[in-house]
Amino acid sequence: MGVGLATSEPAGQTYEQRDPDVRLMLDVRADNAAAFEELVLRYQNRLVTVLEHLVGRRELAEDLAQETFLRVYRARKNYVPGSKFSTWLYTIANNVASNALRSQRRRREVHWESKPTGDSQAVMSLDQLAQAASGQMPTRQIDKAEMRDVVRMAVETLGERQRLAVLLNKFEGMSYEEIAQTMRMTTKAVKSLLTRARVNLREVLEPYLERGDHPDPS
């Protein structure tokens, strides 16, 4: 399956008018190298953060982000704006990450490495995710670095599909419809997936917020 998204011309014009990143990608299609560099600058850190949560290793996430952008560039001539640029980008990234995870499982090398990302926005999102998932404020004073690592472990306890849906919703601010496009699911299925993910996160995080019990990502 190609990574270009077919659409009617009026729909494509709508996305071009509303999404400046779509306009940049159309410039990339016309072989504008500066436009591609701008898209990489806008999305690289965000993409690496999401991929790191999916695959568990910073170095691998950086490699997969490069692979994602390489696929974007290779697909430029067939690009048609059928969605927001970020939706199209994360659809490609999801495919790249899924392939990497399948390869890891075949080699039996899947493991968790907790490393700081250096992304303060991501850390804030994790704090907010913990509170949103648990429905409560922590009853103890908790170091932000500790909170970040614990929530990362909690997210790791989710299944692959729940994890991606949570990351796209909380970190990228995607709507249910955009997540559905990215994951090739119905909007109803995405709502159900996120509901189950929130329940699972609450079950994992409440003991930590109340008593300091760390989640077990195994």
Image (cartoon, rainbow, N blue to C red):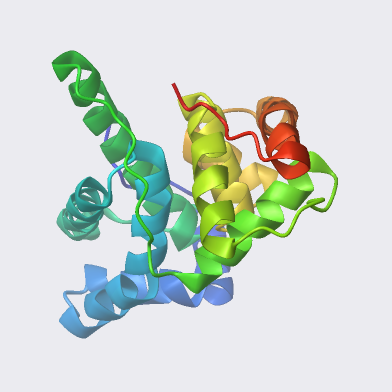
Q: Is residue 158 above or below residue 208?
A: above
Asked if residue 58 can be seen in this view, the reply is yes
Q: Nearer the viewer, residue 6 or 204?
A: 204
Q: Is residue 4 above or below residue 206?
A: below
Q: Quadrant of the C terminus?
A: top left
Q: Is residue 80 visible?
A: no
Q: Is residue 137 left or right of residue 190?
A: right
Q: Residue placed at 20% from the left, 59% from the top? A: 77
Displayed quadrant of residue 48: bottom left
On screen, residue 90 versus residue 140, left or right, reads left
Residue appearing at x 66%, y 30% in the figure: 204
**x, y percent for residue 187:** 68, 33
Against 133, is 144 above or below? below
What x and y, as percent, mark residue 188? 73, 28
Q: Where's residue 11, x and y in %?
A: 56, 57
Q: How many marks?
A: 0
Residue 128 sits in which quadrant? Answer: bottom right
* Residue at 76% across, 53% down: 140
Quarter of the picture holding the N terminus: top left
Q: Nearer the viewer, residue 94 or 54?
A: 54
Instruction: Tell which of 76 and 136 is nearer to you.
Output: 136
In depth, the one of 149 and 210 nearer the eye is 210
Q: Is residue 155 left or right of residue 141?
A: left
- x 67%, y 33%: residue: 201
Residue furthest bottom in the image? 34
The location of residue 56, given as percent across then percent down, is 34, 40
